[in-house]
Amino acid sequence: MKRRSTPYRIPRRSANDNRPVDRKLLNPVLNPESASARAAGLYPLRPDRWPRRASCCSLVTLEVAISTDPASRDGPRSQGSSTIRDYTPTFRVRYTGRPNRGNSVLEIQASLCYLGVKSAVRERRPTFIREVSLAVSAGRPASPMMEVLQNPRFRAIWYVVNVSELTRWMELLVTSVLVYSLTNSTLMLGLVLGFENLPRPIFSPFTGIIADRFDRKKIWISSMAIKLGAGVALFFLLFSGHIAPWHVFVAMLLQGVSRALEDPARRTAIFDIVGERRVVNALSIDSMSGTVGRMVGPFVGGFLIEHIGYFWPHYPGYTWAYAAISIMHIAAVALAIRVRIPPVEREWRVEPIWNSLGDVVRAAFNHKQLIGMLFITIMINGLAFPARQFVPAIGRDHLGVGETLVGVLAAAESVGQLVTAVILASVGTVRYHGRIFAVGAFSVMITSTIFVWSPWYAVTFAILVLSGIGLSCFGTMQGAITMRSSPPEMRGRMVGLQSLCIGIGTPPGVLLMGWLGDRIGIQTSVTLNAIACIAISLPALFLTPLVTRPSDPPPQTVARPQTGAS
């Protein structure tokens, strides 16, 4: 039976005790390969790949993060303001400069570890060292984007998101073309997106609470298992030739439930991993994954439908597409199992669920910038975004192109998204998140009014690329404003509220657009809805400080008396 290792404990000191910490106490930290380090269960440092000696002319940057266990064996939990750092304190010490000749990187690392633990002891925190991590670079400091990508935990999530988003956009194109070919109705085509977004307003507030209280990795894997089940079911229905539009609608409904579960768990995990300073960069990289998936997925789906038409007895192109989709769902689940999401202790009370939801709504109304962002989010998802669902109808009936070029047209926005996401991921500090959000939102609204009228395929493609630039600004700053404006203990619920606002407008908006499209033409329908979106959203810019003030931290909230403990 494997012996369970115990955390290495640094004794507490009094506040006025200024004696230096005995370096012998830090032996497991300073000598990570020692037997005492292995007994303490410390995360192993891997110095074998570092330069053994730094020359006096090279610029070296090292950062040591010492994560501690907040629970003391001989004392109560330390009290303080309700912040994540109080419950999972992390001490970071940074050294940037040109070391003296003869100073090895390992010696500098040892000194930084020593200083970090010393600061923990001086603050009278009950310190149990759980993990010591080190970032080292020689030469120019890494860009913000590379700094985020160098985090192995973020990279693990990023790999899963890449596969998942590629699968999602490929599946959305395949199901949309399939339903339009079966029914030849823009209303039925709109129902595909409507059913995918229908679960969001129903489940998102509750999935936010789940993300705040339970293991986010298990939530994420469960959501991807739902996608896998729906994809495999459609594959067998296509293979047997018994597919019907209502089968697709049920599958899209399950996809919507999966996304309602996934978004709060994944986004709050990203924030906890990279922190507030790099949340814009991390969300931009996350957006890049969706962009690449949107760029490649529809093209691959359209190519399989149009050109791979053999072997399967029924619907051969669609069956091949769903065979590929099912395999990619399996790959995403396998990658997600290997993800390590750090556990974050949050203080929460046993209370009625409606009280918990009421807390997050009150917190949102107390933050005027957040209210302005959420209002525009509802409008744009109800009156502008549904236009993208009708690209197959516009490409086939108005531009006269086949499934492959329809897939390319559906991927056009992702070209602009990708370029913009790379720029946003590389920038440093962003102060006016609301301005970038507003520019992106109104760019999407304006391009929605004109791209449906272009008689040339190349011009339509170019307009959608411009729309993608705005879409990237809108989506990235939407998540950044939400999480920066949320108290840590309700961040998951606030992301759930954002998801609610996304989903509450899409189903009625896409149904209205499809119903009008069957009666007055899809081009007129899209244009009227986009103009209405601009007119209704403009007051939010003048009645809230969304674009006039920098992004504010969340206002202080007064916690209610505890009714129980968990």
Image (tube, rainbow, N blue to C red):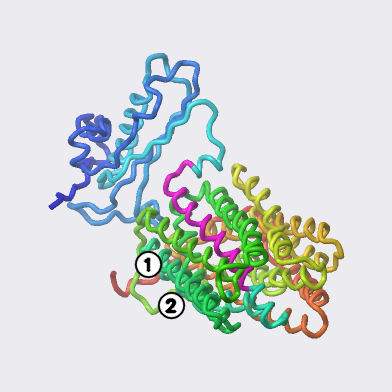
Residue at image coords 29%, 42% = 43
Return the disc, 1 or 2, that comes first in the chain's sequence: 1
Tell me how far mark 1 sits from mark 2, CA to CA: 15 Å
Q: Would residue 361 appear left or right of 296 to someone viewing this image?
A: left
The answer to whether residue 113 shows anywhere in this view is yes
Establish if 266 lies above or below 386.
above
Q: Report the residue marked by disc 2.
A: 355
Find the magenta span and give its range.
150-175
Establish if 85 lies above or below 118.
below
Q: Report the residue marked by disc 1.
A: 213
Is residue 560 found inside the magenta-colored segment of the image?
no
Question: Which mark's residue is nearer the viewer, 1 or 2?
Answer: 1
Q: Residue furthest top?
A: 101
Mark 1 surroundings within 10 Å by alpha-carbon count, few (fewer than 14), some (14 through 19), many (20 or more): some
Is residue 171 found inside the magenta-colored segment of the image?
yes
Establish if 556 lies above or below 425.
below
Residue at image coords 74%, 59% = 467
Mark 2 surroundings within 10 Å by alpha-carbon count, few (fewer than 14), some (14 through 19), many (20 or more): few
The answer to whether residue 498 shows anywhere in this view is no
Residue 282 location, x and y as percent? 53, 50
Tags 1 and 2 in contact by the CB under 8 Å rule? Answer: no
Q: Choose top left, top right, bottom left or bottom right for residue 350.
A: bottom left
Q: Disc 1 on helix, strand or loop?
A: helix
Residue at image coords 31%, 41% = 120
Residue at image coords 38%, 29% = 49
Nearest the eye: 292 or 237: 237
Mark 2 belongs to which amino acid? Asn
Residue 365 location, x and y as percent? 57, 70
